[in-house]
Image (cartoon, grey):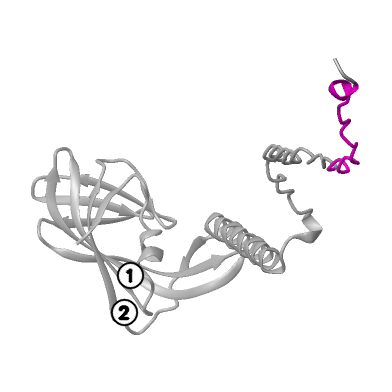
Amino acid sequence: MTDKDLYFEIPEERPSAPPVPVVETPPPAAAPPAPEPEPARAPPAARPLPPSAAPAPARERNRRLTLALAALGAVLVVAIIAVLTFSVTIGPSTNATSYPYTVTYDVVFPNAIPVQVGNIAIVAIPYPDRVSLSVDKVPYDIPLGEKRQITAKHATVTLLGLPLLSFDFTLEVEYRGMTGNDASFGLAVRTSDQIPKFMIDRLLPRDVQARPA
């Protein structure tokens, strides 16, 4: 083996290319978590307004209602007192010249029992063909079907103790026969002035059966 055979060429070292820097890509940022929904809150309860803060129209309505109720109560009290103090006083007639106003009734007087028409005491004792009357102890004998004036008086109506009306009146009766054991009459109340009927009704006693004719 020769030196030539042992000779070989050592390759020349070349500088290597600089290394390519590796850029690390950061991982994508995670999306922020969605906010949790707040729990629903109940609306605050309405607080009643204090009495002093009530709306003006409501206060005015309440005031008017109170005044109306007070006025109604006063009227009722006066009406009750008026009814309790209403009275008719009968006295001697003033000899009125005429009695143009008439209210008529169908009445039944109990047999032989005194009744009061105003303060006039009347006792009727009936018979089939006539009736015997006592009017303030003045006797009358009235045949069946006959009309007779039995008294003339003066009446004064008072209310709350004060004179309200004053008038003359007469009582005229027509005997109509017996109803059972009692005496049936047509009764006419004739007055010198026009008087409300409910006042004339007060002349008739409660124990006499009477109805407008």
Residue 9 counted in the magenta span: yes
Q: Position of residue 38 (x, y in %)?
A: 71, 39
Q: Quadrant of the N terminus?
A: top right
x 34%, y 44%: residue: 207
Give the prevailing secondary structure in the magenta stretch. loop
- Residue extending farthest front: 2
Whether residue 164 sits left or right of residue 134 in the image: it is right
Residues under numbered marks 1 and 2 in contact, where contact means CB atoms less than 8 Å apart: yes
Q: Secondary structure at mark 1?
A: strand
Residue 25 circle label: none
Residue 2 lies in the magenta-colored region: no
129 is higher (above) or lower (below) than 4: below
Picture quadrant of residue 200: bottom left
- Quarter residue 17 falls in: top right
Q: Earlier in the sequence, mark 1 or mark 2?
A: 2
Residue at the limit of the structure toward the top, as seen here: 1
- The numbered mark at residue 99 is 2
On the image, the x and y values in percent for residue 26 come to 80, 40
Q: Is residue 6 above or below residue 164?
A: above
Q: On the picture, is 59 further left or further right than 213?
A: right
Name the quadrant containing residue 193: bottom left
- Specify few, some or many for label 1: CA neighbours under 10 Å numbering under 14, 14-19, or 20 or more: some
Q: Which residues are magenta?
A: 3-20
In the foreground, 2 or 147: 2
Q: Which residue is mark 1?
A: 170
> Callout 2: helix, strand or loop?
loop
94 lies above or below 82: below
Which residue is more in the foreground, 19 or 71?
19
Where residue 117 appears, as percent x and y from the top left, is 37, 56
